[in-house]
Image (tube, grey):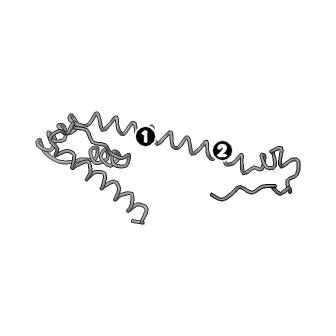
Amino acid sequence: MDAYHRCRTDHAVNNLREEKAKTIEKDWDNHIALRAANVSILWQMMTRMSGKGFYEARDFVELMAAIGEPVSKAVQTVHADNQQIRDNHSELAKLDQILDSGQYENDTEEERVDPNAVADEVDPLT
């Protein structure tokens, strides 16, 4: 595992540990805040559970009945957020192509007058 993925995994684990500590408090409201990666990991774990026998099946059904719907909604939110991020990146790439095309080079009035002119003043250092 490279450093980037190890760092992301460490952050995910830290988030889960932080939230786990909240669950033992007396005034816990049955809500935890998970990062998007943790929501995806939790959903994958839940949907990939396997086992044999009545008791394991019962435990799984109880788990899904208790938290399946809110986790599913969280996963849908994460997917929608990720789609918005992909759309934003696509729009930024289009803008980048427009800027790289050179279409807007030397298009200000000051540059049209004399692109080689030197400024009379220099901004003071602060």
Image x and y of residue 64, in percent: 22, 37
Q: Compare residues 48 and 1 and report the one nearer the observer.
A: 1
**Which quadrant: the N terminus?**
bottom left
Q: Are marks 2 and 1 in contact (CB under 8 Å)?
A: no
Q: Compare residues 20 and 66 and report the one nearer the observer.
A: 20
Please report the residue visible at 77 percent of the width from the left and 46 percent of the height from the top. 104
**Which element is circle 1 on?**
helix
Q: Which mark is residue 23?
A: none
Classed neighbour count for the residue bearing mark 2: other residues with Cα under 10 Å, few (<14), some (14–19), many (≥20): few
Q: Quick one: which residue is furthest to the left in this view? A: 55
Please report the residue visible at 34 percent of the width from the left and 34 percent of the height from the top. 73
Image x and y of residue 98, in percent: 71, 46
Nearer-N-terminus badge (2/1): 1
Q: Amino acid at mark 2?
A: Lys
**Which element is circle 2 on?**
helix
Q: Is residue 1 left or right of residue 89?
A: left
Image x and y of residue 43, in percent: 31, 44
Please report the residue visible at 83 percent of the width from the left and 44 percent of the height from the top. 109
Q: Which mark is residue 79?
A: 1
Image x and y of residue 9, in percent: 35, 58
**Which quadrant: the C terminus?**
bottom right
Q: Compare residues 99 and 106 and report the one nearer the observer.
A: 106
Q: Quick one: which residue is furthest to the right in this view? A: 113
Please report the residue visible at 28 percent of the width from the left and 51 percent of the height from the top. 16
Count of numbered circles on the image: 2
Residue that badge 2 annotates: 94
Q: Spatial distance from mark 2 to mark 1, Cα to Cα?
A: 23 Å
Residue 113 vs 116, above or below: the answer is above
Q: Amino acid at mark 1?
A: His
